[in-house]
């Protein structure tokens, strides 16, 4: 699994990244690659800049402009429920 946090380093982007890390640790998922994408051109490929933070899971845009609830992230990252393409 590959997770990409789309954001320029704002408070919510960092908060999302921290939450993803916490959930992955809770789930014991050490096989997941997490990276932050802060290049504005790359972010605009998926969404407008004013919609950050964004979350890509295996190339699927799972959320924009908000931080998903912890329970939702647990479902997505544990494989119980796949994120729907936005």
Image: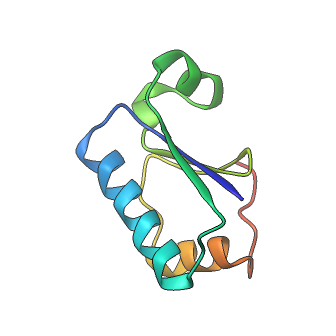
Q: Nearer the viewer, residue 33 or 73?
A: 33
Residue that appears at 36% across and 31% down: 8
Q: Quadrant of residue 17?
A: bottom left
x and y percent of residue 80 in the render? 74, 82
Residue located farthest toward the front when viewing the structure as drawn: 30
The percent position of residue 53, horizontal first and vertical second, equals: 43, 43
Relative depth, front residue between 30 and 84? 30
Q: Which image quarter holds the N terminus?
A: bottom right
Identify the residue at image location x=31%, y=57%. Answer: 15
- Say if 54 sits above or below 7 in the image: below
Is 50 rendered above or below residue 75? above
Q: Position of residue 24 (x, y in %)?
A: 52, 73
Q: Nearer the viewer, residue 35 or 66?
A: 35
- The part of the image, by quadrant, that contains residue 45 is top right
- Residue 32 location (% of width, % of height): 63, 62
In this view, 22 is above or below 39? below
């Amino acid at each position: 699994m590959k997770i990409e946090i789309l954001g320029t380093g704002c408070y919510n982007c960092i908060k999302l990244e921290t939450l993803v890390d916490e959930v992955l640790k809770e789930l014991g998922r050490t096989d997941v690659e997490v990276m932050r994408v802060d290049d504005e051109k790359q972010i605009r490929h998926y969404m407008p800049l004013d919609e950050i933070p964004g979350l890509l899971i295996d190339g699927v845009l799972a959320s924009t402009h908000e931080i998903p609830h912890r329970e939702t992230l647990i479902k997505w990252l544990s494989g119980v429920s796949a994120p729907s393409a936005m």
